[in-house]
Image (tube, rainbow, N blue to C red):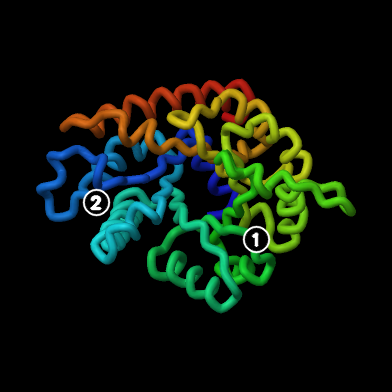
Amino acid sequence: MNAQQLFDEIRKKRSFLCVGLDSDIQKIPKHLLGTSDPLFAFNKEIIDYTHDLAVAYKPNLAFYESLGPEGMASLEKTVKYIRDKHPGLFLIADAKRGDIGNTSGLYARAFFEHFNFDAVTVAPYMGEDSVKPFMAYPGKWVILLALTSNKGASDFQYLKDENSGNQLFESVLKKSQKWGTSDSMMYVVGATKAEKLREIREIIPDHFLLVPGVGAQGGSLQDVAKYGLNKRCGLLVNSSRGIIYAGTGENFAAEARTQAEIIQVEMEEILLEAELI
């Protein structure tokens, strides 16, 4: 799926919503714990109730890896279910990988060949040779961490290079554009850093941004759109806890849909106002 095809899906669904499948065995409704695969049962219900409102899903690998082989089996079943039932959806492995070249090559093989994800989040700290192996798969995407919302982001991401005058996150954006194109590389920018999107768009006007932090983390969708929207939307805005844990009882999936609808309606208004649909 290239950037134009992703934009086509956004226009069709009138949404740029990404649902984060941060599926925690300790938080899912208790009635699912008696099923043969509680995590998959939870994900399946969320997907069934929200697939027409979202253009992407983003499982966070930590929630699956923490359960060992059973958790990874749940992840694999989730991806296969989406591929079989809803093949137009964009699937992101939120794995934050990034290692020396041969190891990155194996991570790329795992996520793109074995699991058949469309994209994987990658940490750029080790440089080009740690990212390039992920770029060797036509039609697949690297999503580089650029500017995150966590408290520790200020430890390194805003450090200024005295020679170039760039902050570290700016150097990541400028340097990495040589590694891929706007059809193969996205960037993570936290929604609570929305005011920085104006600066970021000056550096990367055409790339898609994956924007977590809307909803439970307090990010503003309107602010993200104000500073981050481009001519092909250019945004995948993620909401995880605010959607998937909206309800705790047997109607949890319906309540998740209600929350997803609220976001989708706001996104539709934004797209209409920007004359993108």
Of the two numbered discs 2 and 1 in the rendering, the one whose residue sits closer to the viewer = 1
Across and down, in percent, residue 17 comes to 47, 36
Amino acid, disc 2: Phe
Q: Residues within 10 Å of mark 2 (few under 14, many from 20)?
A: many
Residue under the image location 38 percent in, 31 percent down: 242
Residue under the image location 47 percent in, 57 percent down: 95
Give SS at disc 1.
loop
Amino acid, disc 1: Tyr
Numbered badge on residue 190: none
Across and down, in percent, residue 68 comes to 28, 63
Spatial separation of the CA atoms under disc 2 and disc 1: 33 Å
Across and down, in percent, residue 155 comes to 65, 46
Label 2 sits on residue: 40
Horizontal side of 211 relative to 201 (left or right) equals left
From where the camera sits, is residue 14 visible? no
In this picture, is 232 found above or below 124? above
Residue under the image location 46 percent in, 66 percent down: 112
From where the camera sits, is residue 155 visible? yes
In this picture, is 129 found above or below 38? below
Which quarter of the rendered picture does the C terminus lie within?
top right
Horizontal side of 46 relative to 119 (left or right) equals left
- Front position in the image: 110 or 25: 25
In this picture, is 60 found above or below 14? below
Numbered badge on residue 125: 1
Residue under the image location 57 percent in, 39 percent down: 151
